[in-house]
Each structure stands twice: as C-alpha cells, then as structure tokens.
Image: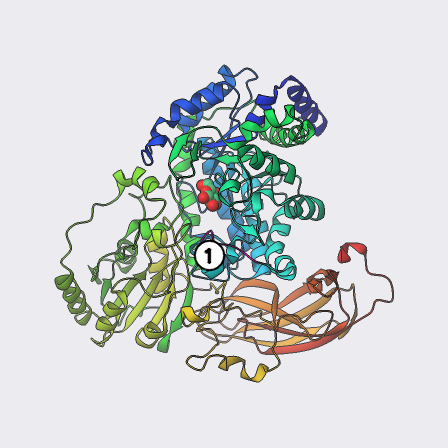
C-alpha cells in the first residue's frame, strides 16, 4: 500500500520537474470528439490533440469511451510525453455507460439512496473497464422549474432528498475511498444555482438570494463534499452576474473554506473562454487569470475557439496563457502548483501511474454483464410512480384481460426508453415497453401494437444532434408514416382489445441540456390519440415516458391508470410490464410537485406561509394553485395506514436530537411498497420558515397485514438554517410541527418545543 506521504512526495518530485507549460497542461482538459464531423473543426481535432498530449500540454480528455482509443491516447501520454504523466479520462456517466439505468430524476423517485449507490457502482465499474476515470455526475442542482430540460438530470426540488441522493451517488462512483478498485472519481455539478435559470431557459441568468442559495441549493453540494467527492464542476451560469468559473467568493470561500472541499474544480465546457462571451473577462489572458485566481483548477475546453462572429477555429484553451501570466507576474505560480498538485494526487491515488492501460477483453465482458442488467430492471421498477389507479384496474387480472393494445409512438422506441445523456449504450438490446409486454404477457394473451401518431419532434434540432449522429448506425430508420391511417388503426385496435396501454411522453432529445420547453403539453398529437382511444370505452393505462412532469389535466380524466415511468433504461420495458402485471409492486414517489399547468411553475411544497394561508389554494382566479400531484406522492397496489406518532419528548434543548416513532400498517391484501416521510415546520424564529420541509424518509415493503414501527432521528442540524436577518446560520428556540405519512400532505401530526439550551450549542451547529 502506498501511504499518503509517499504519494505527496511523488507529487512534489513531479512538480519540481515540470515546466510552466506542463503545469498548465495538467490543468487543461479537452473534448475528444473523434468521428464527429459537425462542426467540421472537430474532424481535424484528433491530430491537434495527439500533439498536445505528446507535448505535455493536455492532462485530461473527455468523451472517449472506447477502450482501444483510451489505450492509444494513454500510450502517447505515458510513452511519448517528456514526463510520462498519464491522462485522466472524464465522461458523462450520468445514468450508466453500456447498461443504462433510469434517468437520475427517476432514481430520485425511488427514494432509495442505497439503490442509487448500487446503480452508480455498476456505472463506475463499466466506465473504469473502458478506461474512464471520472464521471461528470451526479448532477445535484436543485430544479424547481420543469420547463428547464435538465431537471431530468437531478433529484428534483427538495434539498434533503437531493442531499441524500447526492451522497449516495458519490459513494457509488467512488467506493470506500478514492482509488478503490473498479471505481471512479465523482464530479457533482454544476456549482451552483444552474437550476434556477430565469424562465427555465437553459443557460439564462440566475439571481439568487443568499438565503435561497444556502438553504436550498447548497445542501446537496455539502452532502456530496461530506461523502468525499473528488471533483466538482462549476456552472456555466453566473449567480447575480458573476459566472460560476470565476466566482471566488463561492468556490473558494464557500466551497473550499466553509464546506471543506479538498478535491479539484473543473469548469463546464469552454466556460473559461466564455467568461469573455459573458462580457465578464476582457480576453483569454484575463479569463484564465480570473478563473485560476478565483480557485478553479482545470479548464474544460472544446479545443475549438469561438470567435466574436461565432465561427469556430481549432486551438488551445484559455489556460494555455497561464505560463505567460505567471511570467508577467499577474498569476502567482503557487496557485498553479496547488491546482496541479490536486490533479496529480488524484492520478496517483487512482493508480494511473502503475496501471495506465485497460484490458480490452475484460472490458467486453464487464460491459455485457447480465448482473448489471438485472439491477437496471430493479431500478426501473423501483423508480416508477403510480399516479392514478381507478378501481384498482392495475395490476392486470389475467383472468379478465385476454388482449392488450399497446399504443403510442414511444411504446417501441428504444432511444425514448433510454432517455438523454447516453453515448456508449447498446440500442439493440434495449427492451421497449412493447417487447416487455409481449414477454410478460405470455403466449396465451394477445398483445398487438400500433404507434398511432409519429414520434414527436423538436421545433429546432438538439445541440446533441451531431453526437447522436455518431451512434445513428444502430438507430432504427424511420419508415414512411401514414398519419391518418395509423391513427385510425390504433383506435380500432383499442376498441377490439380488453385494455389499451398508451405509451406517451417525450422523445429523449426533449429533455436534458438545451431542451427547455415553453409548455408542459404532451408533444404532438399524443393527447388527441389518448382522447380518441379513451372514447372507445376500452380502459386506458397511460404509461408516461418523460424527464419532467407533463400537463395531465385532460389525461387524468380519461385514463383509468397513470404510471410515470420516466426514461427507464436498458431493461425499462420489462420493468414496466412486470409492474402492470403485478409481478413487481410500484412504490416510487414524486421528487417534485407535479403542476397542473405550466402557468403554475415554479411550484414547490416547501413554500413560505403568507398572511392569508386560508386562501393559498386560490391564488389564481382561473385555476387552483395546488399541484395536480403533491411532492412525495405515489400509489402502490394496496393501502397503508399510519398511527401512533410518538416523540421521545415534547420539550428539547436547542442542540438535542428528536427521536420519533411511527407505526405503519399494511391494511390491504397485497404487499405494498411505501416511503414513510417525515416533515418539519418551525412556527416562529429569526426568519419565516417553509410550511413543511422533508427531514427524513424510509422506503419499506410490508406484507399484507404487517405492521412496522419506524424510528426516525432528527438531529439539531436539521433545524439549522440561514437567516437573512442575521446573515448567519441559526438555530431557533421555537414550536415545531412534525408530520409523518405517505406524501408531503401527510396529516398525522405532533408538536414539540425547542428551548434555549441550558449549555451552549456546539459551534459546529452554528458555523
Ligand atoms: C454540460 C455538462 C457536461 C459537459 C461535458 C456541458 O455542456 O453542461 O453537464 O458534463 O458538457 O459533456
């Protein structure tokens, strides 16, 4: 075993041998988009980057996922560069590499951090096998506006759920410690506030108060740091006018100083050069200088530069100017050294100097492990949220349902089953809902398919269109589509079947980056199709594939059941079929408040109480102001009852932990999957606090008639918050309400009083 000291010594020895150019090189990461011809500059990039690596001017690459290619590039770095420092390969391992898991928003809907950890453990294993060392994940941005396409990449609206999911995923990627075998570095992103873009428009400006920043947006980052994240990515956007890559106050004072982050910080793509585009930096010297002085360690660069007229040309990133900046005295070399040390230390801890290459044969078997697919199916089953189930139409009763019409453009759409942010997947072996239904229904049930309407299209192409083109050789070619005939065929099929399963929602390029929407409508003619099918009288089961809530006001009136299945991944279709047939039990809960219409957003459950709480559901004269489905909501097959909410004491000291017990009973004849949720509310203090805030939860399974007593511990830190009045974190003596139940609307209630401590609270609670 190499001790920390010897690693540190090796870092110092290497550093002492490095030129300024080589130091800047270790802080420069380049996109490696070999094969992408759009824009044409990318095609010429291979040659340019090979020579940068050889010269020691590139220390990290992103977007290589082919083991032969990572080995080829690593050979150049190790054998042909002066110091032989291996490259660090990063990649967007967002919800799997080859085995694709449900999108992160779906994983959050499982309310099962252990599952999220397991999923990212597998993603790390597959990534490491092909030579990837670092995931640009998890995305821990709180997202409260579903128009923002990137809501799909995070854990939704809540800081506590977000923090639990963030920490779990960091543990999954990294394992016990950085450098664990088969694990990679986690890179939580985007620090910070990206999800608050005005109007839900990706990349638009963000204006956040300090209290919102600290009480809502910071906790998932704090949890990720606490879990040991080795990297953090800064945000494209600037909060209150200061772009993320150069916000010294936030990255150095808050992230490193207050939260104690000791890994390395990377910019988002081209975000250092874009300090100029933002009208923040004067030129690339100024941009690089201000970023490194703010505390950024590494620049992620396209390797193509955008001129004032938005044309692109091949070239180094802004950090290539750092050697001159040091020589000119505008940057202290010590700053570069500290950043380089952080990067080298990680390369050493990952064992890259000893084992720079991967075994290409082993990579093949790791990528195709059936065990990985099994977890993907379980994850999809645990992520689905049953929103509506009239008269217990689900699960199907096999003695009644003899024929099923599977309808809708997404029912046999492999990319929509996988969702956005997949680049190294296997489309061929992706199980669609249609295939899953056929497999689970068995030979004696009739399952027929009609798409009904074409797959919905974006008005403008996705910014990822060029990358998607790369894997287009495996994508199905779309056949000519007779819209009228197909629509009629689908309706006819529904009328001659016992049940219609409609698989509707969003194509994968409709969410993710650059995929904001101005409405939450079902895109294209999908609602019309649903209405026509429902008019036949055949019960409709709506299976929704999406990365955000959609406007279901009409659909909820027409469908007998609705299952939000998100983009469920490689085994998604099988998981959905097993849920519909009752071979698996739904138990997911919403990680956001599901709005009735786009006009309500942003809509959150943890809002402040107004002076007129009695009219809070009447804020609009034309629509209710409550959500269609509340945060934390989700049905199961069966019913639970909560009782006996007890607190260990109704009077506690400021720094005391509250112990809560509650009984949960399965009062039905089927097993249930339930997430017990605990919410807190502070009645008065140094700032008004939200009407409810999630503070604990546990996902459980109960057999028919089974009762469990769940213990929850609510530490004093759960009552700590940032008060604008004080400009500090505070703990208030106050009266608190506590609710426990199935959703954020839980009614089982108790209250307790927090009094000034007889002794001083530990300083850790106040800083
Ligand atoms: C995104 C990041 C991503 C990076 C590399 C950027 O456009 O904002 O989340 O990790 O690209 O693909």
Residue 417, percent across and down?
34, 52
Q: Quadrant of the C terminus?
A: bottom right
Residue 543, percent across and down?
33, 63
Task: Left or right? Give the position of 752 relative to 690.
Answer: right
Task: Left or right? Give the position of 611 relative to 183.
Answer: right
* 428 is higher (above) or lower (below) than 445: above
Q: Quadrant of the N terminus?
A: top right
The one of 445 and 594 positioned closer to us in this rendering:
594
Q: Is mark 1 within 8 Å of ligand 1?
A: no
The one of 62 and 195 positioned closer to us in this rendering:
195
The residue that mark 1 highlights is 151
Residue 685, percent across and down?
73, 72
Residue extent of the magenta highlight: 201-207
* 739 is higher (above) or lower (below) than 82: below
The one of 33 and 572 positioned closer to us in this rendering:
33
Q: Is residue 426 visible?
A: no
Q: From this viewpoint, which residue is outermost toward the right?
A: 758
Say what secondary structure mark 1 lies in: helix
* 314 is higher (above) or lower (below) than 510: above
Give the image's coloring scheme: rainbow
Task: Left or right? Give the position of 178 relative to 116.
Answer: right
* 392 is higher (above) or lower (below) than 569: below
Residue 339, percent across and down?
63, 32
Q: Is residue 640 visible?
A: yes
The one of 324 and 743 positioned closer to us in this rendering:
324
Q: What secondary structure do most residues of the magenta stretch adopt?
A: loop
Is 286 within the magenta? no
Is 206 within the magenta? yes
């Amino acid at each position: 075993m190499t001790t920390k000291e010897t690693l540190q010594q090796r870092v110092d020895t290497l550093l002492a041998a490095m030129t300024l150019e080589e130091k800047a090189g270790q802080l420069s990461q380049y996109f490696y988009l070999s094969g992408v011809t759009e824009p044409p500059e990318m095609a010429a990039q291979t040659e340019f980057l090979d020579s940068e690596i050889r010269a020691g001017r590139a220390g990290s690459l992103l977007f290589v996922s082919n083991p032969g290619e990572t080995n080829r590039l690593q050979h150049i770095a190790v054998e042909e560069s002066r110091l032989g420092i291996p490259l660090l390969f990063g990649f967007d391992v967002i919800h799997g590499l080859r085995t694709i898991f449900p999108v992160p928003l779906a994983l959050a809907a499982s309310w099962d951090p252990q599952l999220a950890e397991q999923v990212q453990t597998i993603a790390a294993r597959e990534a490491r096998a092909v030579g990837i060392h670092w995931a640009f994940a998890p995305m821990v941005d709180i997202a409260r506006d579903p128009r923002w396409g990137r809501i799909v990449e995070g854990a939704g609206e809540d800081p506590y759920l977000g923090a639990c999911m963030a920490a779990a995923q960091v543990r999954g990627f990294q394992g016990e410690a950085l450098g664990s075998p088969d694990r990679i570095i986690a890179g939580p992103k985007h620090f910070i506030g990206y999800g608050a873009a005005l109007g839900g428009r990706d990349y638009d400006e963000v204006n956040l108060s300090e209290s919102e920043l600290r009480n809502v947006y910071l906790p998932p980052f704090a949890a990720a740091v606490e879990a040991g994240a080795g990297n953090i990515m800064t945000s494209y956007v600037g909060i209150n006018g200061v772009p993320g890559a150069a916000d010294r106050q936030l990255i150095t004072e808050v992230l490193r100083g207050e939260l104690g982050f000791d890994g390395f910080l990377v910019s988002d793509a081209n975000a250092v050069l874009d300090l100029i585009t933002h009208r923040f930096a004067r030129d690339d010297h100024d941009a690089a200088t201000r970023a490194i002085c703010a505390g950024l360690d590494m620049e992620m660069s396209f390797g193509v530069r955008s001129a004032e007229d938005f044309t692109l040309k091949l070239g180094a990133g802004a950090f290539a100017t750092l050697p001159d900046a040091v020589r000119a005295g505008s940057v202290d070399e010590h700053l570069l050294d500290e950043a380089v040390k952080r990067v080298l230390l990680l390369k050493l801890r990952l064992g890259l100097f000893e084992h720079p290459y991967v075994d290409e044969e082993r990579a093949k078997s790791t990528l195709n492990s059936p065990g990985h697919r099994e977890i993907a199916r379980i994850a999809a089953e645990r992520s689905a949220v049953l929103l509506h189930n009239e008269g217990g139409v689900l699960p199907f009763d096999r003695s009644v349902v003899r024929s099923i019409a599977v309808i809708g453009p997404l029912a046999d759409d492999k990319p929509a089953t996988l969702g956005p942010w997949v680049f190294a997947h296997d489309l061929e072996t992706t199980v669609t809902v249609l295939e899953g239904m056929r497999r689970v229904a068995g030979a004696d049930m009739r399952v027929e398919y009609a798409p009904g309407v074409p797959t919905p299209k974006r008005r403008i192409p996705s910014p990822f269109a060029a990358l998607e083109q790369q894997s287009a050789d495996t994508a199905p070619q779309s056949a000519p589509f007779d819209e009228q005939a197909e629509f009629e065929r689908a309706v006819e099929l529904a009328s001659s079947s016992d049940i219609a399963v409609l698989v509707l929602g969003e194509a994968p390029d409709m969410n993710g980056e650059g995929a904001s929407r101005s409405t939450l409508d079902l895109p294209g003619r999908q609602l019309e199709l649903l209405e026509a099918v429902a008019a036949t009288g055949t019960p409709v089961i709506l299976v929704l594939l999406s990365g955000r809530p959609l406007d279901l006001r009409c659909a909820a009136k027409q469908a007998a059941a609705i299952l939000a299945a998100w983009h469920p991944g490689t085994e998604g279709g099988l998981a959905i079929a097993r849920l519909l047939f009752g071979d698996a039990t739904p138990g997911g809960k919403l990680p956001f408040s599901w709005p009735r219409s786009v006009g309500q957003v942003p809509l959150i459950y943890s809002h402040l109480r107004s002076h007129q709480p009695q009219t809070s559901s009447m804020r609009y004269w034309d629509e209710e102001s409550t959500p269609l489905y509340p945060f934390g909501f989700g049905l199961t097959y069966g019913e639970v009852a909560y009782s006996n909410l007890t607190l260990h004491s109704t009077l506690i000291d400021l720094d005391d932990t509250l112990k809560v017990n509650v009984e949960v009973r399965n009062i039905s004849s089927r097993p249930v999957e339930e997430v017990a949720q605990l919410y807190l509310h502070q009645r008065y203090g140094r700032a008004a606090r939200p009407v409810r805030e999630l503070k604990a939860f546990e996902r459980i399974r109960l057999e028919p008639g089974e009762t469990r007593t769940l213990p929850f511990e609510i530490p004093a830190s759960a009552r700590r918050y940032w008060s604008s009045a004080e400009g500090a974190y505070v703990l208030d003596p106050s009266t608190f309400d506590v609710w426990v139940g199935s959703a954020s609307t839980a009614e089982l209630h108790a209250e307790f009083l927090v009094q000034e401590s007889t002794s001083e609270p530990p300083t850790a609670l106040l800083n």
